[in-house]
Image: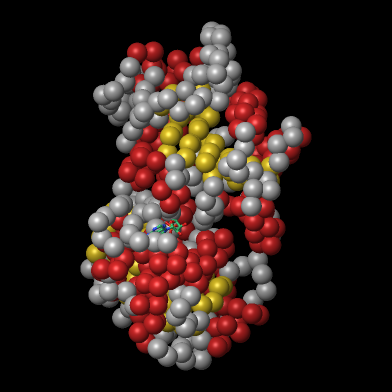
């Protein structure tokens, strides 16, 4: 956090009041850097993940401008467009606008699939200060001639890398083509691969660039560990881990990531059969069902949620203190997104990754991306020495010549990325069964 206070930023008084009520005093680093730039009207390219306070970083300057205009949008026009990859995230962005803009008169509308388009069309006809949309439904309405974006003066692309992962790149290009060239554009992404940079270059004009390094957010607040386990033992390992947490549960929530929808569903069924209240959230569920599931989770009625990467986007639930990667993600940057679901807003959290022999290469990609080794936790009943041995071999560079040996490694192949000493979920050391 910086020394700066919100009161020293030139934000309109109604916004300052709302921030005080919310209890925010200091802007987060991205807010401290982005808000002055955005108030000047400049474009912005921001590399920052969820949990950094990026929503307020764009919502506050946008609301500031609306407050200054002090007049309603004209019928059928939209002033600001915010594109998000998922419905959940769209809803959360709109909630943030309501929270920060509670003392400002403004009209906001949501456009996404999975619900009737009629109320959305009506809102567009009335005119909107802010439209939060997912790309598919918005394009649909544009093609029907029901969404006119020619009056947009500010365009925000949120979680651009996730949009690309979800195959929205062409939709984004088609939408951007319909926007006026004279506009302010804000581009947010957790990662900045070549494809993202290319897209950013086509949309932005001399942007200010801000990078909030994921290393800081992942390393400092989240206790990360990897558990080597045979694929067949993962379920038993998860039961041990959750079982011990359920015993003295104080409203803490657990988010489990599965690579496939089918896997998520099956896992939730198995956990329920074992007496652990669990729900699953994945793309096959309707919007209403997903929201209900999220509410139950948020309230702690189902303290365990199994999710796929896509469905978990934008889940902003405060009490998640454990994230389990039941399967390691195929793409390393998903790891950063996943574990970013815990340790929200300054709280601490724990991220545990189950890694089978087939996933060792995925673990290496993750470590290369986050630029640190993940601590190996052997202290559980399902530790696989066979997988651990393969991991050690790989570490010597035999399999992966691109990887440099790291400082801070100790004997027996263990690596330490941070302080140890977090309570273990099993007090007892596993028996070391060769080849287990
Ligand atoms: P975001 O990265 O936008 O998803 O925000 C992460 C969380 O931090 C949200 O729950 C916000 O309500 C909270 N938050 C954002 N800005 C601040 C701030 N300046 N002080 C305290 N909490 C904040």
Q: How is the image coloured?
A: secondary structure
Q: Is residue 283 above or below residue 128?
A: above
The image quadrant where one finds the C terminus is top right
Q: Residue furthest right?
A: 273
x and y percentages locating residue 10 in the rendered image: 27, 74
Percent coordinates x, y for residue 150 in the rendering: 42, 84
> Disc count in the image?
0
Q: Which residue is pictured at 60% across the width and 40% down the height?
A: 250
**334 to the left or right of 433:** left
Q: Is residue 364 visible?
A: yes
Residue at position x 58%, y 42% from top?
Answer: 252
The quadrant holding residue 71 is: bottom left
Q: Position of residue 237 (x, y in %)?
A: 61, 25
**Above or below: residue 340 compared with residue 387:** below
Would residue 265 appear left or right of 110 to someone viewing this image? right
Q: Is residue 323 above or below residue 109?
A: above
Q: Looking at the image, which is closer to me, 32 or 112?
A: 32
Quarter occupied by residue 122 = bottom right
Q: Residue at x 45, y 15 (%)?
A: 389
Residue located at (36% from left, 38% from top)? 219
Q: Is residue 282 left or right of residue 128?
A: right
**Ligand 1 lies in quarter:** bottom left
């Amino acid at each position: 956090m910086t020394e700066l206070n919100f009161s020293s930023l030139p934000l309109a008084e109604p916004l300052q009041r709302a921030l005080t009520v919310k209890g925010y005093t200091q802007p987060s680093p991205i807010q401290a850097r982005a808000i002055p730039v955005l108030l000047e009207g400049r474009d912005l390219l921001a590399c920052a993940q969820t949990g950094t306070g990026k929503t307020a970083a764009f919502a506050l300057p946008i609301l500031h401008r609306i407050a200054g205009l002090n007049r309603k949008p004209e019928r059928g026009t939209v002033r600001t467009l915010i594109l998000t990859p998922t419905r959940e995230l769209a809803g959360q962005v709109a909630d943030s606008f309501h929270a920060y803009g509670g003392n400002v008169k403004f009209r906001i509308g949501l456009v996404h699939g999975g619900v009737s388009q009629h109320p959305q069309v009506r809102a567009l006809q009335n005119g909107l200060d802010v439209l939060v949309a997912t790309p598919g439904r918005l394009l649909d309405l544009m093609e029907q001639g029901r969404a006119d974006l020619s009056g947009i003066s500010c365009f925000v692309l949120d979680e651009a890398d996730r949009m690309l992962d979800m195959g929205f790149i062409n939709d984004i290009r088609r939408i951007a083509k319909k926007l006026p060239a004279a506009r302010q554009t804000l581009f947010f992404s957790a990662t900045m691969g070549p494809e993202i940079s290319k897209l950013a270059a086509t949309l932005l004009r001399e942007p200010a660039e801000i990078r909030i390094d994921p290393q800081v957010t992942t390393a400092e607040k989240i206790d990360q560990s990897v558990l080597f386990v045979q694929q067949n033992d993962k379920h038993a390992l998860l039961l041990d881990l959750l079982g011990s947490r359920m015993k003295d549960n104080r409203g803490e929530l657990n988010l489990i990531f599965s690579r496939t929808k089918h896997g998520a569903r099956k896992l939730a069924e198995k956990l329920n059969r074992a007496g652990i209240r669990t729900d699953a959230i994945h793309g096959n569920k309707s919007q209403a069902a997903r929201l209900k599931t999220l509410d139950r989770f948020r309230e702690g009625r189902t303290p365990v949620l199994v999710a796929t990467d896509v469905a978990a986007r934008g889940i902003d639930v405060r009490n998640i203190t454990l994230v389990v990667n039941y399967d390691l993600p195929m793409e390393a940057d998903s790891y950063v997104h996943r574990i970013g679901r815990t340790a929200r807003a300054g709280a601490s959290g724990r991220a545990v990754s189950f890694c089978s022999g087939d996933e060792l290469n995925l673990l290496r990609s993750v470590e290369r991306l986050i630029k640190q080794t993940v601590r190996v936790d052997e202290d559980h009943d399902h530790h696989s020495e066979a997988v651990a041995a393969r991991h050690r071999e790989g570490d010597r560079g035999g399999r992966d010549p691109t990887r440099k040996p790291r400082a801070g490694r100790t004997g027996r192949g263990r690596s330490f990325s941070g302080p140890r000493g977090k309570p273990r979920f099993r007090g007892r050391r596993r028996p070391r069964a060769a080849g287990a």
